[in-house]
Amino acid sequence: MRHDGRMTSQPRSHSLGAARWNELDEAVTLLVPIGSCEQHGSHLPLDTDTQIALEIAHRAAAHIDDCLVAPPITISASGEHQGFPGTLSIGNEAVTLSVIELCRSADWARRIVLVNGHGGNVGAITAACKVLAAEGRPALDWWPTGSNTDLHAGRIETSVMLLIDPDQVDTASMETGPTPSYAALAEHGVQELSPTGVLGDPHGATAAEGEEWLTKWTTDLVTAIRRDEP
């Protein structure tokens, strides 16, 4: 159930925050959702990445024994969205350090899986995992793959949000944006390339398509976790 009393599409029965310390042991697999607080066009909420990462993590946890989902990291590296009101970012170095310290603090867990919902975090999380591996604290980093022509606030994210919480999707405000290369995005940032903030085309999005993507991502994540079994 959401904080406002509405039901989400997936029950939250695996939440670390709802557990008690004496119920935990080192057999736990801990999933850490990592999202963002950044514009997602005029039709999606700022915490879209966080909601999607959290949904994937809880769905995956239902298939993994002794698995808990940590409270999400909700503000991360969103510098490419600078200039849009509402965007909050702590930068790559801070994200790297935050992930390192968080994983160090979770030595009580058997293993840690970082479920990243924001592409802008990839470099920071990869850097953190290298440090953790050198310390003997290997963490599995995973993020959902989509389409090179649907980079941000397009059909995929809109479809998934129509499933998670359709009340938060303003379909009347959907606009089509350009589909720049990753290199252009890194060089110019989103606002210069797309004043609407959309990179792709959200039109045609459906909750049914959102379920297809969530099922695919959940399967991919569960497979990755099982493959990484110590």
Image (cartoon, rainbow, N blue to C red):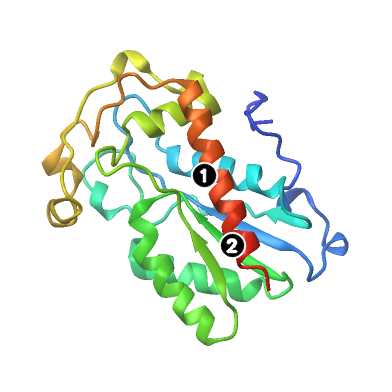
x and y percentages locating residue 209 in the rendered image:
46, 26
x and y percentages locating residue 218 in the rendered image:
57, 45
The furthest residue to the right: 22
Which of these two is toward me, 152 or 210?
210
Q: Spatial distance from mark 1 to mark 2, Cα to Cα?
A: 14 Å
Q: Earlier in the sequence, mark 1 or mark 2?
A: 2
Residue sitting at 37 percent across and 43 percent down?
146
- 155 to the left or right of 140: left
Label 2 residue SS: strand
x and y percentages locating residue 228 in the rendered image:
61, 68
**Residue 113, label in figure:** 2
Relative to 211, say whether 172 is above or below: above
Label 1 residue SS: helix
Quadrant placement of the C terminus: bottom right
Q: Can you tell which quarter of the image residue 159 is in?
A: top left
Disc 1 target residue:
217
- Amino acid type of the residue tagged 1 in the rendering: Trp
10 Å crowding of disc 1: few (<14), some (14-19), many (20+): many
Residue sitting at 55 percent across and 73 percent down?
101
**One can see residue 167 in this view:** yes
**One can see residue 77 in this view:** no
- 209 to the left or right of 190: right
- Amino acid type of the residue tagged 2 in the rendering: Val
- 225 to the left or right of 41: right
Quadrant placement of the N terminus: top right
- 186 to the left or right of 170: left
x and y percentages locating residue 227 in the rendered image:
61, 64
10 Å crowding of disc 2: few (<14), some (14-19), many (20+): many
Q: How many discs appear?
A: 2
Which of these two is toward me, 220 or 3?
220
Q: Can you tell which quarter of the image residue 126 is in?
A: bottom left
Relative to 164, say whether 112 is above or below: below
